[in-house]
Amino acid sequence: MKTEKGVTLISVTIYVIVMLIVVSIITVLTVYFYRNVDVNSANEDFNQQYTRFNSYFTEEINRKGNKIAGYEDINDEEGNLKQRYIIFSSGNQYTFVKQNQAIYMNDTKIAENITGFEYNIQQTNGKTTITVVISKGDNLTRTTNYTLVD
């Protein structure tokens, strides 16, 4: 009796099916991984922009005797926000330009890819508190309270 050595058509088909299943699983895992990397990259960029703004603004807030000299929202003809700014007695102006999606200190861009910038100024017990809300899109938002140093 002769021994048959070799691969049959059925075994090749089984190998191909198993390989397709393995490659499909690896593809699904890879896509999931890269989507999470993109989300982390967006969060990381927003955190970087927020930290840069926060460092400049905190330095401004901590200057002794610094007060708010003025603030205003500038709207277009339809009433949509165009610019929003705060001016301090030190002469520094922090401006959010909606069209550029950026925050400027005087003429220097200190944060970019920012879709929202809101502030609320309150006087309590003789202290001025500024609440700043910075956002990027609908899901990334940071709210910080700053108290001016007397």
Image: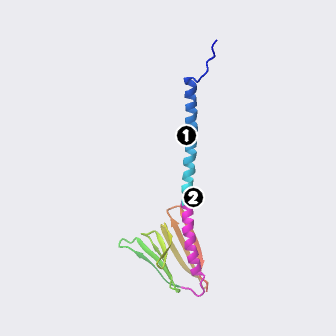
Q: Which mark is residue 69?
A: none
Q: Secondary structure at mark 1?
A: helix
* Residue 101 is a magenta residue: no
Q: Amino acid at mark 2?
A: Asn
* Residue with the mark numbered 2: 40
* Residue 60 is a magenta residue: yes
Q: Is residue 149 left or right of residue 86?
A: right
In the rendered image, the quadrant that contains the N terminus is: top right
The spot of residue 143 in percent (x, y) is 57, 70
Residue 31 or residue 147, whichever sits in front: 31
Q: Residues within 10 Å of mark 2 (few under 14, many from 20)?
A: few
Q: Secondary structure at mark 2?
A: helix
User: Residue 75's quadrant in the figure?
Assistant: bottom left
The spot of residue 27 in percent (x, y) is 55, 43
* Residue with the mark numbered 1: 24
Residue 33 or residue 137, whichever sits in front: 33
State the residue at coordinates (44%, 70%): 98
Give the magenta-colored segment's residue range. Answer: 42-67
Residue 92 or residue 4, whichever sits in front: 4
The spot of residue 116 in percent (x, y) is 49, 68
State the residue at coordinates (51%, 64%): 136
Q: Residues within 10 Å of mark 1 (few under 14, many from 20)?
A: few
